[in-house]
Amino acid sequence: MTAVNPSRQERKFIGYDWTFDIANNWSLTNRFAYTDIRYFQRITDFQSVDEITGLIQRAISNTNIFRGTISSNLDLKGKFETGPFNHSVLIGTDYFAFDLNAIGVCCSAPLDTPINLFAPVYSFSGYVKPQNNFFFTDRESWKGVYAQDFISFADDRLHLLFGGRYDWADTGFGFSPTSFAEANGLFNPATGNGFQSAFDRAFSPRLGAVVQAAPWLSFYGNYSQSFGATNAIVIPGQPPFPPQKGKQYEGGAKAEFFDKRLTATMAFYDITKSNIVQTVPGTMFSRPVGLVESKGVEFDIAGRINENWSLIGNYSFDDAHVTKDVTSEQGNRLQNVPFNAGSIWVKYDALGDFRGLSLGGGVVVVGERQGDNLNSFQLPAYARVDTAIIYRFQPSFLPGVQNLTAQLNVKNLFNTTYYLNAADGFSIVPGAPRTFIASLRAEF
């Protein structure tokens, strides 16, 4: 199919990022970005699977997507003092606009060349470009203002954060099986075709505190709320998705060892989020889930133990589940989230005659995860081993080059079979096999 009607992607980007120093400790920053992305995707996909016989009936997904975004922000940053209090303030505003148009085939007629899951023979013949059967538009306009003040006092042992933002969001989508004109026209509840829009606004506060109990130990806590649009395709005829809202409580401690060469952080958190969505299996559409909660603990350590050895490690325990839902998913584990996950990376930097040589190795461990919110299947746990060898030297044979670094990374050293995540039983993403990455970097 790709030889007759190939897939391709075109990207355009324009942007800038500048900062103007107004006065001592005061600056103004402005960023702007424009993107134009065009996808032309031709996929032979599943239409049905017989799990007993292994017969997979295939169909063509033929989609052209045109996506444009504009984003900008203006930030004023400054520092000042009021008596014993030192203030670091931020005041700003931002804007984001998103426009997407998609045309194509979400489900064509079955192909004449099915394959068998247990004995696949990959072939494709008799391609005829199918007729378009959907026209979809998605538009967002997002404006926000925000401010925060980070206050330090008591000889820099106590710190408080007060902040928040206010958002205005216009979102809308349109659908039609025949034309963009109908997709952008008035919504018809009888057919589910036409354009629907919604307007939302919200204030999201942010509060935090840090106590420096000792030069090497500090404790912190924070509370924040979030507000965001739901970027997913509604089932035709259903109302627009309400915005996603979240609340987060977090507290923990941070310690420094070996003259601040090594840092360790432990955090406890409880996050709830409403109005999240999930895909409807075998389709391009999504449906609301309801309320989910994620609570657990994280531990991170990073730094240098001595002149030769350094490490980066982390571990997390996450109890994530659906707390409210209109279906039988309430109480189920949230898909793609393991109870336990962690990694450690250790690096040895040689000295003496072998100075410049570094050897690194580590392992990533991820526990069993649910493949969907119905908890109907599981992605197995895995451990992936990665390694690296690095050599830095000063090349006398290259004038002007101060340092040259040659590096070889091997990801998934033992070629482990594993799965990263799943959207549903039809869409499971496998991890990459053993991969070699070589690089050469010159510093002038």
Image: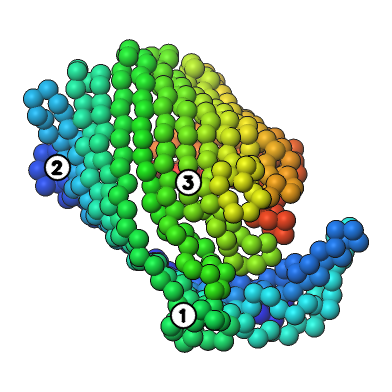
Q: In this figure, which colouring scheme has been used for the structure?
A: rainbow
Please state which amino acid type lies under the numbered disc 1.
Phe
Q: Residues within 10 Å of mark 2 (few under 14, many from 20)?
A: some
Residue at x-position 56% and y-position 73%:
236
Classify residue 401 by image quadrant. top left
Indicate which label's residue lies in the foreground, 3 or 2: 3
Q: Which residue is mark 2?
A: 26
Residue at x-position 60% and y-position 75%:
63
Give the Cα separation between the discs numbered 2 and 1. Answer: 50 Å
Residue situated in front as seen by the camera: 158 or 18: 158
Give the Cα separation between the discs numbered 3 and 2. Answer: 36 Å
Under tag 1, what secondary structure?
loop
Q: Is residue 215 left or right of residue 88?
A: right
Q: Residues within 10 Å of mark 3 (few under 14, many from 20)?
A: many
- The numbered disc on residue 187 is 1
Q: Residues within 10 Å of mark 1 (few under 14, many from 20)?
A: some
Q: Position of residue 377 (x, y in %)?
A: 74, 47
220 versus 16 height, above or below: above
Indicate which label's residue lies in the foreground, 2 or 1: 1
Q: Which residue is mark 3?
A: 273
Please state which amino acid type lies under the numbered disc 3.
Lys
| Label located before the other in sequence (1 or 3) | 1
Give the Cα separation between the discs numbered 1 and 3. Answer: 29 Å
Residue 14 visible here: no
Q: Is residue 61 left or right of residue 401?
A: right
Under tag 3, what secondary structure?
strand
Q: Is residue 16 left or right of residue 309?
A: left
Q: Position of residue 165 (x, y in %)?
A: 28, 48
Residue at x-position 30% and y-position 27%:
209
Under tag 2, what secondary structure?
strand
